[in-house]
Amino acid sequence: MKISLIVPTYNSAEYIQACLASLVTQLEDFAEIIVIDDCSTDGTFALLSAFAERNQAVHVLQTETNSGPGVARNLGIEHAKGEWILFVDSDDALTDLALKQLIQFVDPETVNCDVVAFDWRYKKDNVNNETFHFEGRFDKPEFTNEKALLLEKYVKFRMDHSAIYLMIKRQLLIEHQVSFAGGFHEDIDFTFLVYWHAREVKLLDEVIYLKTPRPGSIVNSVSTSHIKGFYRSYAVIHTLLKSVSKNQSLHTAFLTGVIGLVATCIRKIFLKAPSKELREPLYEYTFKQLNDFSVPIDSLPLDKTYYSLLVKHFLNTMMTHETAAQRRSEVIDEFLEENEGKKWSCIDLHHSAFLAPKEIRTCCKRFFVDNEMRGDVTIVNSEQLEQSENLVKTIMDAKKKLFADINMGEPTGCDGCPYLEFKQWGAIESSKITKVSYEHHSVCNLKCSYCSDTYYGGEKPAYDVLALQKSLLDEQRLSEKALCIWGGGEPTSDKHFSKLLLQTTERLPLSSNRVITNAVVFNKAIYELLLAKKVSIFTSIDAGTEETFVKIRGKNSLHKVMENLVKYSSANAEAVTVKYIFTDGNKFQAEIRAFAELIDRYQLKACNFQISFDFKEERISSDDLVLIVRLYKSLKQLGAHVVYLDDLILMRIGELSADEEALLADKLELAGLNDIVALADSKVPIALWGAGETARLLLEHSNYFKRVELAYFVDPDPNKIGTTFMGKPVYAPDMLTKTQTPVFIAAVQYYAPIYREFKQLGLPDSRLINKLII
């Protein structure tokens, strides 16, 4: 006998026969069914007895008193003859070939384990029920871990606790006396003990189990018995850990799990208790159970994850609200209503992909944590690239994992990132990629002083970029209005560049294509697409003289670059952006003056100008800010319409203290530059064009926006119009034609097209806040 199927049941006359019918057809001569009736009162036992008479492999038992599924399962284990135990709930089923798949998987010649985990889904006739919006194991990656780490993940509430999605060796249960407790959530400590005693746990990545989502079932209802069951199960685990485990990381993980336990109870009350009157005593009972628990409340490692935020709010409400229990319940409900479903993520994690030669990154952001530069977070490494059979799927799966890890409090490369936002993000698998950066090689014809091997290593892609782009397009993974950034290395150095660029503009005619070129070599495809208004280009000059250009950019190609920019700008000057990145080698007043003269000499003032800063610097000094302001003013005096700072500057200015602000003001006045810096006037409300990342950074970090009154946002995105952002309404851009509110363009890469749209609305430049905001 290979497998014993154990089916506990209570008052299941309506559906138990359908469950058993799905099992008996695949028993053959290697499996048996043991059904344990838990003192049903609806005729279930008689139905079972009749069914067993017709099927010799079906055995029917009955408990002495109604005791719950755990006690019934224990009785089944006592009478089982199979080498393996498989639990099935009486309203569920197995897939047609489930038992054969399991037997083949545990062939001792290929697999040696004590426990097999497998996948599940809902029965097809139940999948339209919106109450049950997820299915399948969420913890499959954890089964690749060593057992010690698997146990940590389990007690952290990072794994499925259900016993029905496991096949377990009967000898393990007998040898270690592992059994179910009475009451609810008996699976939690049972499954932990199974993993604890198992020599090895394996995953069969196939759907074996078919679940019926029944609204009134134990997992879809809540009571004091449910809450008590949760705490009881973790108390059992805690007792075991205290008595036998010296693994400190496992004890630390357990404390994180307690946070998950409490948060799960709170959320279950909020989602499953149908009225305020029912929720109130359940919140109180949850708090009492926590107070009586063996873990001190002040030892819980509360962090920024949603579960921690929820538990922190719950504890604060229950301990400090000097009001009636009803009001405490209302406060908790209000928090859940406002925050339920919110998670930590960023635009790039959900909607971007950055292709590098030997990896795929999810962002190109850089930030500092404890004086250490972080960012450029990798999601697919070189080994995964080599092993991937479907790179698009590999990218999306990696994004899902990173998203999950961030929100579970696992260490990630995103820790400390200021771009993370806590809000409703939706599922990554249904998200379109709205930004893809083609930095798939590091072949370049210049060597900049601030560059690295990432962009100047001479590496070609370790994967087929043409095939990846085709898959992204064929699978409609890219948004119709995707922003495609072409970089590298020098993008024109890639032999496939023109083909990739033309294919994108043809397949995605509404896409925006931004080429980051050093313009040393003139590219005909870029020129023709500029004429057709299908691309824009960005070129860093970073110098006003040949000497400095050689020092910063690595070759004496300044005038060749300028001549090519003249050609490009003749096709479409509004789509050409010239950058000046401040570094140690060009932070001089004379160089800034020479740069402005260079722009004037080549008549490029109709282009756009972006001022940036060396990404390796954590903060920008007041002296450097003076130089930035000087360059801004020089370009404005030249007649340039579009001059703006990029986010590397916005992020690194930070909030200035009163002393720092006063020092900066003195230096600007001494340099004759104070007239170009905007002064906040609290009496004149302003509007921000752009309800996104840049706007948030400005509002959170800029001293100017600490003092000025923000009236509203405008944004052309239909998904944002009519909503609120950072507490202010978001309107369509034509709102500006109905008011006289001054406007500031809160954008970096989209500054130039926004300015053009601003002008198309017939608005005068006098409405724009054209001075620098610090």
Image: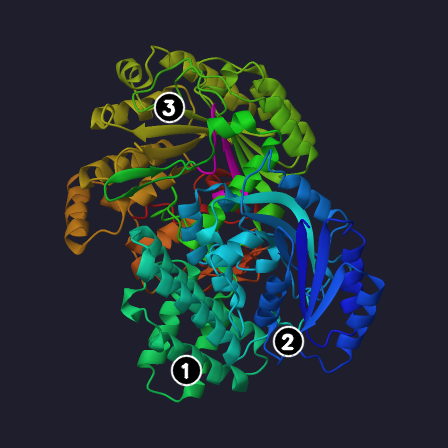
Nearer the camera: disc 1 or disc 3: 1
Q: Quadrant of residue 220?
A: bottom right
Residue 62 located within the stretch drawn in magenta:
no
Identified by mark 2, the residue type is: Thr
Secondary structure of the residue carrying numbered label 2: loop
User: Up-down: is 102 above or below 443?
Assistant: below
Q: Report which residue position mark 2 lands on.
A: 63
Q: Which residues are magenta?
A: 345-363
3D distance between C-alphas at marks 2 and 1: 42 Å
Residues 400 and 452: in front is 400
Q: Which residue is mark 1?
A: 328
Can you give x and y, in whole percent of width and height, for residue 101 in the image? 70, 43
Name which residue lies at 61% across and 43% down: 204
Residue closer to the observer: 251 or 332: 251
* Residue placed under numbered mark 3 in the picture: 599
Label 2 to label 3: alpha-carbon separation = 90 Å
Query: In the figure, 546 relative to 754: above or below?
Result: above
Q: Is residue 350 among the parts visible in the rendering?
A: no
